Image (cartoon, grey):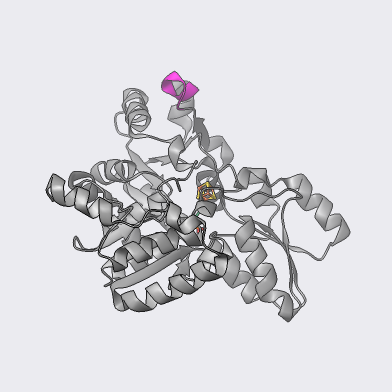
Amino acid sequence: MSANSRSLQKAMQKEMQDFTAMSEDEIQQRIVAAKAALGDRLIILGHHYQREETFIHADVSGDSLKLSRSAANSKAEYIVFCGVHFMAEVADIVSRPEQISILPDLAAGCSMADMANLANVERAWRELSEVREPDEQITPVTYINSAADLKAFCGAHGGIVCTSTNARHVLDWSFSQREKVLFFPDQHLGRNTAFAMGIPLEEMVVWDYDLPMGGLTPEQIKNAKMILWKGYCSVHQLFTPEYIDQFKEQHPETKVIAHPECSFEVCQKSDYVGSTEYIINTIRDSEPGTRWLVGTELNLVNRLHEQFKHENKSVHFMSGTVCMCSTMFRIGPSSLLWILENLLEGNVVNQITVAPDEKEHALQALNRMLEVSP
Ligand code: 13P
Ligand code: SF4
């Protein structure tokens, strides 16, 4: 596109501020109308943590794995991702080249994903290769909550991506390839999954990316099967085992369910551990009258509370304080409408594109994941 046509397009673009003064009702009605006008050219994917006013417009809702599959299978020209940045990147990687992936607010990142970057992962890789035994190899595994260049790193180094749904299958595959795993950025998903597979905590170490050699001795690295990156989710780290104990003192019959991004202690005290989709399905399939304490993001827990109260199931949040994913929250109805009305006028705003060389290797790692996923 020439500089002239770019500035013409810019001039024709609807500006975000035009939408912020509108009433909620008008925004909602105009989203419905824009979706109808775009028809099959559009698919809106919505993560379970989206706030209700946005979530209701999703054509498909799901966890990271389900939404990645929906993006890969969609024929729509525009994939609008109501989620966070890494999700829209995955949509761009797995979709066809002519499809366009859009994130309604570019500031919707993931603070956990930001805890690992290519420079510090490459440094860790170099330092680990200096101390590991000559006949020992390491599989790099990145949680899908990571930037595209880290997925590409895994693709190029015989590694793989995982989500909270398939982490166990991915680790089984990883250990069938090589003796050790370097798992980033979420230490909790790595630890909880490996422990459930029978790997003892003594065979896991935490790699502190701010310190030379991860703050570990060569001996510690030699004895470890799992090298866990020192990353975490700021939302899920707020849940505590003490809260579970206090709640169960008052309601001993409670079933506890947690996302695997929660700490080891919280997961150990939980009756069930799994992805957002797993949490929804488990509560849906439970007996009427069941009381649930749920350790995951507040918007999802509030939705579950509303959805199942008519079946006499009571769903409680695992914290006395409000903890939401503030970046998921950024995708409001006004930014969604801004995107859709621009598309109707032929303007693509907030497109997410991954560079072709990164895309090739990131796709390799994502395809390995999809092949081993249940
Ligand atoms: P799920 O894939 O389980 O939906 O998790 C995504 C996420 O970011 C949880 O914090
Ligand atoms: Fe990232 Fe945590 Fe938000 Fe999930 S809940 S998107 S891991 S910051």
Does 359 appear above or below 210?
below
Q: Is residue 173 magenta?
A: no
Residue lying at the far right of the rendered structure: 250
Taking the spot 33% from the left edge, 41% from the top edge, the residue there is: 150
Residue 228 picture location, percent across and down: 48, 37
Q: Work out whether 253 lies above or below 93.
A: below
Residue 372 placement (x, y as % from top left): 35, 61
The answer to whether 343 appears left or right of 258 in the picture is left
Viewer-closest of 163 and 46: 46
Q: Is residue 70 left or right of residue 250?
A: left
33 sits left or right of 100 in the view? right
Determine the residue positioned at 41% across, 56% down.
104
Q: Quadrant of the C terminus?
A: bottom left
Residue 68 visible to the viewer: no
What is the quadrant of residue 119 in the picture? Answer: top left
What residue is shown at x 61% (from left), y 70% (from top)?
Answer: 282
Between 365 and 13, the one nearer to me in the picture: 13
Q: How many marks?
A: 0
Find the residue positioned furthest to the left.
2
In this view, 309 is above or below 164: below
Would you place residue 353 above or below residue 127 in this image? below
Q: Is residue 64 left or right of residue 256?
A: left
Magenta segment: 209-216
Q: Nearer the viewer, residue 132 or 313?
A: 313
